[in-house]
Amino acid sequence: MMKGGAVATLIVLLASCLSGCVSGSDTEKRGDQGPIDVPSWEVGDWWLYTFSTPEFSDDTTRLVVASTSEEDGTAYMLAISSLTEARRHAVLNHNPFLGRITHTDLSAFENGEPQTVLKFPLEEGNSWSFTLFSVEWEAIVSDLNGGIVTVFATSNDGSRLDYVFDSEAGFFSTFVWKDQSGIDNLRMMLSDRGEGHTGDVYFVRGGDWFSNTWEDTGTDFEFRDTFLVSDHPSDGGWDEMIYFLDAESGAGSTITMTLRDHLSVSALERVWGPGASEIGTLGTIPSPSEEYTLTATFTGGSTFLRIMIAGGITESWSL
């Protein structure tokens, strides 16, 4: 009888111990779901992202913290480790997370105003609003698990943002912008990260000047347009003109394109004969003038030409 009582007591003690262990584990797990505070970045911190868009080929870019003292000491400067990539992002304009990023919420600037894509501390169920890509968004934290924060944002036109903040990485692990039909306008994926980047990094402040696309324009067609180049509203004159172009001329077709300044001096000339193509060309033209005229001439039925032109002001840092 005494032996049976001892066994029963031992079982109770073991059950109590196991219960305590499970309870402690649950508490620990629940504690891990607490609010996520804003990380603190240091100069040289970096993130390697792949950017995918439906119109352009994928590009992989290393974003680097170049400075921690922008905006009177309230913002970071997020730059790019390659000048070519910095120029590409300035003319394609598909990366909102370049330039100034605030210390308080890692807010990106759009039209001169910080936009709270993230609102710290991050906690499940928190909601807020912001503007990005010139669209107004309503965001909510849908899940928080082990330092991984999932957010989705919706707009009145049916577009959606889905993004994940990784507290260990200190930035986004994914950021996806979908249109009303569910097609990705932008997909940003983290592939690597680190600290202590060394070397020159760049930020090219862009200003959109001209963009057009022509496809299967007909047997004979000519387009001519003039655009003015004025100074950047706050930073003065531009360092250079940046252009990006894609061209494909089918069998029996030709494309001729010229860009001339106000003195009729040719700044850019291209001719694509039958079967010729040129995809993803990025180039620069120094010392922009006040006025340019672009002329594009198409013969034959199977042609495609896309050109984007922007002004660029380059800043650089040596880390």
Image: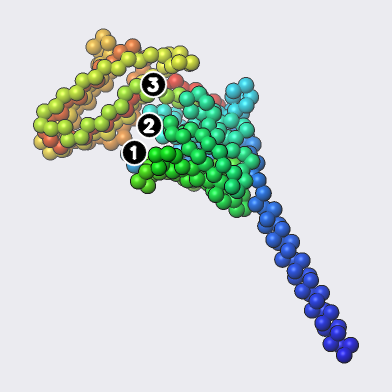
Residue 152 image offset from top left, x and y in percent? 50, 45
Reading the image, the residue beneath label 2 is 92
Give the numbered dot on residue 56. 1
Among the 4 quarters of the image, the one containing residue 114: top right
Question: Which quadrant is home to the N terminus?
Answer: bottom right
Tag 3 secondary structure: strand
For residue 240, above or below residue 179: above
Tag 2 secondary structure: helix
Q: Nearer the viewer, residue 200 or 32?
A: 32
Q: Hey, what amino acid is under mark 1?
A: Phe
Residue 266 image offset from top left, x and y in percent? 25, 16
Whether tag 2 and tag 1 are in contact, CB under 8 A, the answer is yes
Outermost residue toward the bottom in this view: 1
Residue 237 image offset from top left, x and y in percent? 43, 13
- Spatial separation of the CA atoms under disc 1 and disc 3: 20 Å
Q: Earlier in the sequence, mark 1 or mark 3?
A: 1
Reading the image, the residue beneath label 3 is 311
Whether tag 2 and tag 3 are in contact, CB under 8 A, the answer is no
Tag 1 secondary structure: loop
Q: Residue at x 56, y 38 (%)?
A: 128
Q: Hey, what amino acid is under mark 2?
A: Leu
